Amino acid sequence: MSKGKKKPTTYKFAALREEAARRSEGQEKRPEIPPFILDDVTPPIIITAPDTLERQLIIAEMIGPSGTFEAAQALPLLRALCGPAFGQLWSLIRNDTDPNTAIALVQTLIQHFYDAIEAEAADVPGGSEGSLN
C-alpha cells in the first residue's frame, strides 16, 4: 500500500441486520393485514400483503404522494402488489380487452393493503405518514 492511501472502510451485513433489529425493538407491531382473495375463480387467487423489501420499495416508488399512479405503471405495480400470486392473476386478465380491468385491480389492491403500504412507507427513508392520502 503506497503512502497516503487509506484502507477503505468495510462493513458487515450481519452487523447492519443487528442494528436494524435493535431499532425495531419496542416499536409498535404492525397489524396483520388479511390477504386479498378473489374467490370466484378456481382455485381462488390469494394475494398477500406486500411483505418483502422488493415489493414495498417498488410500490413506494410508483405510488405518488397523493396515492396516484400513472397508467403506464399499472403492470409493474400490479406485479409488486401481487407478489407470488401475479402469475395466477395475470393468466386471468392478460387477454382482457379493457385496460381499466388492470387499473381497477391496482386501485382495489392499494385500498385493501393501504394500512400495510402506509406503515412501510413511514419506515422507508424519505417515506412519510400520509403518503397515500
Image (cartoon, helix red, strand yellow):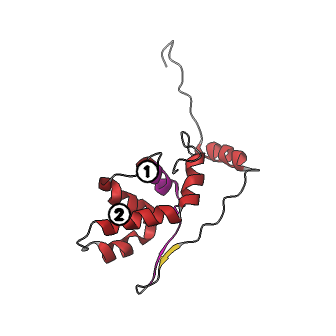
Going 40% across and 85% down the picture, which residue do you hit?
Answer: 41
Q: Are marks 1 and 2 in contact (CB under 8 Å)?
A: no
The residue tagged with tag 2: helix, strand or loop? helix
The residue tagged with tag 1: helix, strand or loop? loop
Residue numbers of the magenta segment: 44-60
Relative side of 36 to 15, left or right: left
Residue 63, label in figure: 1
Q: Position of residue 61 (x, y in %)?
A: 43, 47
Q: Position of residue 15 (x, y in %)?
A: 65, 43
Q: Relative to residue 14, is residue 71 depicted above or below?
A: below
Q: Nearer the viewer, residue 51 or 104?
A: 104
- Residue at far right of view: 26
Going 52% across and 58% down the picture, which residue do you hit?
Answer: 52
Relative side of 16 to 37, left or right: right
Q: Nearer the viewer, residue 13 or 59?
A: 59
For mark 2, what is the residue? 103
Q: What amino acid type should be assigned to the residue bearing mark 1?
A: Ile
Relative side of 89 to 131, left or right: left
Q: Earlier in the sequence, mark 1 or mark 2?
A: 1
Q: What amino acid type should be assigned to the residue bearing mark 2?
A: Ile
- Would residue 51 be counted in the magenta stretch? yes
Q: Residues within 10 Å of mark 1 (few under 14, many from 20)?
A: some
Image quadrant in which you'd find residue 10 = top right
Q: Position of residue 83 (x, y in %)?
A: 45, 65
